[in-house]
Image (spheres, rainbow, N blue to C red):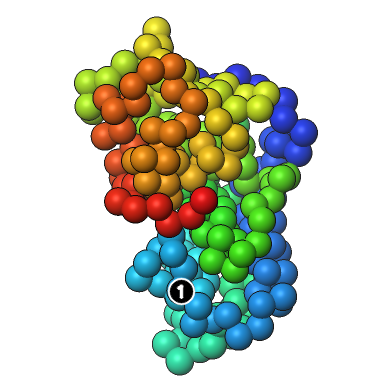
Amino acid sequence: MTSSPIRVPGWNPATAAEGYRQVRGNIALLLTGHAGAGERPVPACPQWTVRELVAHLTQICDRVITRFGGAACPVPESASVAEVLRLWLERGPEADALLDADGDGKSRGDIMVMDAFTHELDLRYALGAPPPEAHGAWLRSFEVLVGGLGSSLGEHGLPGLRIETEGATWIAGTEPVAAVLSGTPVDLYRSLAGRRSPAQIAALAWPGDAEPWLRAFTWGPFAPPDEEIER
């Protein structure tokens, strides 16, 4: 998988730690503005409430810290969403310190950042908040998802796919590419992250029939929902 430089305003090449820190800050602001939302369901994660989404992020943070020798701090089952958020905000800086980039510019924390950013978007849709126009996690998260789709294309015996959005291009899979998929950053990202239905993915800007490609959008932890869960 390859990618061209990002030229979209606001799509800065932030470090993994910077992107992860921004996710925490954004989610804290979202929950401050939506007091009492802890038991609200999250459509993109149908088994979770808002509290359970934040608990997941806190547990992942704890898991990463303990993997590298830090002390464990489990999330109490009885903790409120505010208490879980406070625990994540307290532990976050310790995780940031572990997200340094390796020598090739990649980071061992890119998947962690992608997971956190994807769930920030899940939370925004659950609370009726708009997606961010600028975010330090956009670029690294997109790279992870395009790489996952590229591997899935190969596993399904499909050729490469060029993905284009405002000022950015990636190649998923191998070249030469056989099709081009284009759309807004949010529509493409949510499609790659298993948040858009097959009908919504097919409605993106494809040069022809999208059907042969749709099965590749199920990969790793991601699978398009049967029905539309967000516009």
Q: Residue at x 58, y 50 (%)?
A: 99
Between 129 and 144, the one nearer to me in the picture: 129
Identify the image quadrant of the N terminus.
Answer: top left
Point out residue 56 in the picture as x, y percentages from the top left corner.
45, 69
Q: In the figure, 114 relative to 155: above or below?
A: below
Q: Amino acid at mark 1?
A: Pro
Q: Is residue 208 left or right of residue 88?
A: left
Kindly indicate the quadrant of the structure image that contains residue 49: bottom left
| Residue 1 appearing in the image | no
Q: Residue furthest top?
A: 176
| Residue 25 appearing in the image | yes
Between 29 and 108, the one nearer to me in the picture: 29
Q: In the figure, 205 relative to 98: above or below?
A: above
Q: Residue at x 66, y 27 (%)?
A: 166
Q: Is residue 189 left or right of residue 214?
A: right
Between 66 and 115, the one nearer to me in the picture: 115
Q: Is residue 131 left or right of residue 174?
A: right
The kind of secondary structure element at disc 1 is loop
Point out residue 86 in the picture as x, y percentages from the top left corner.
63, 79
Point out residue 162 in the picture as x, y percentages from the top left corner.
47, 19
Q: In the figure, 214 relative to 132: above or below?
A: above
Question: How many marks do you count on the picture?
Answer: 1
Q: Which residue is mark 1?
A: 41
Q: Residue at x 33, y 21 (%)?
A: 209
